[in-house]
Image: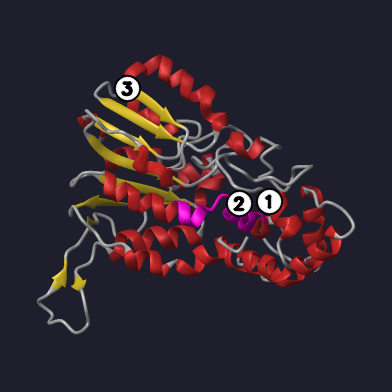
Amino acid sequence: MNATINLEKKHFPVLLNELISIISPLYGGTFIDCTFGQGGYSEKILESKNNNIIALDRDKDVLNKTLKLQNKYKERFKFYNLKFSQLDQIKLKNHKLKGIIFDLGYSLNQIKNSQKGLSFSDKGKLNMRMGLNDFSANEIISSMGENNLAKVFKVFGDEKYSKKIAREIIKKRKEKIIKTEDLVQIIDNVKKYQKTKIHNSTKVFQALRILVNKEISELINGLINSFNLIPTGGIIVVVSFHSIEDKIVKFFFKHYSEQKNSSRYLPETEVSERCFKLINKKPILPSLSEIRQNPPSRSAKLRYGIKINDKCDFSEFREKFNNLINVEDLR
């Protein structure tokens, strides 16, 4: 799930220069690229001969690209076909881990691959699986109840017409198997008199993609595992692309970088220790020149934190977004 893309040209790793300046790879060390995609970040970091990359991606379609890097950089590059919630399975023997990178976008290759069915311009069976999945979008649309469908569209897509769209899906699936083009038509019929700046299907497709790939629990578990894996002084960097992701990432860094009373009943002097140091409290955004070159990058936000404590209790983090995880578990 890597880097924002320009559908008319080529793949661009978004905020690349900003990310490189933050992680300072010229000083050497090992970096984990949790969302390898087309390898834009990994390739740039590997340009310095003192660096190693451990890359993850749940999508097996990236293997051709990983083989090229493996052949070029030999023992300096290693790839795991894992979800980033499985970071704890990585072996770091003899590695000086300096940074962990998450880019939560999708690559041009993934969008253009009609078999993945990420685009509402595709035809055929609904899918949206990015790899290592338990179910597809087809199974959701074919079997999920009306109320749950509406909840998924509303919570994960902020879709105003979630109930009407869910009702029409239930009606249509009694007649036929709903394919990508059918779902687009259903949504268009419901929203035919609505004028919006985005495609009518954008929000529903986003909601289905989040559900199918368990993107909420993946992100939460991935962030917690990254903290547990990286040593004190290491840096965690996250590039997000929609408001739900950014809300989770913002809370992760901001909440655990502030000194606060561990209980409202304790004196002001007794405070819980911070887990992160934040250099930038606000997100780093793409420059105007990058947005001109790669328009989809306009929604990107980069946040990062430096680990300053060996232990951290993330129970509040999980509890904060438990309502989203419950929606993921509706199926």
User: Which comes before the other along the chain, label 3 or label 1?
Assistant: 3
Mark 2 lies on a secondary structure that is helix
Q: Tags 1 and 2 in contact by the CB under 8 Å rule?
A: yes
215 in the magenta segment: yes
User: What residue did someone put label 3 on?
Assistant: 76
Q: Which mark is residue 212?
A: 2
**Mark carried by residue 137:** 1
Check disc 1: other Cα within 10 Å, few if <14, some if 14-19, many if 20+. many
Q: Secondary structure at mark 1?
A: helix
Q: Residue at x 21, y 44 (%)?
A: 231
Left/right of residue 323 with respect to residue 280 in the rendered view: right
Q: Are marks 2 and 3 in contact (CB under 8 Å)?
A: no
Check if residue 124 falls in the magenta segment.
Answer: no
Depth check: 284 or 67 in front?
67
Residue 198 picture quarter: bottom right
* 218 over 18 or under it: above or below: below
Q: State the residue in front, 293 or 80.
A: 80
Q: Which of label 2 and label 3 is nearer to you?
A: 2
Q: Secondary structure at mark 3?
A: helix
Identified at 63% across, 69% down, the residue is 151
Q: Nearer the viewer, mark 3 or mark 1?
A: 1
Q: Which residues are magenta?
A: 205-218
Give the alpha-carbon distance from disc 3 to disc 1, as whole Å: 37 Å
| Residue at 27 percent of width and 21 percent of height | 49
Q: Which kind of residue does numbered mark 1 sit on? A: Ala
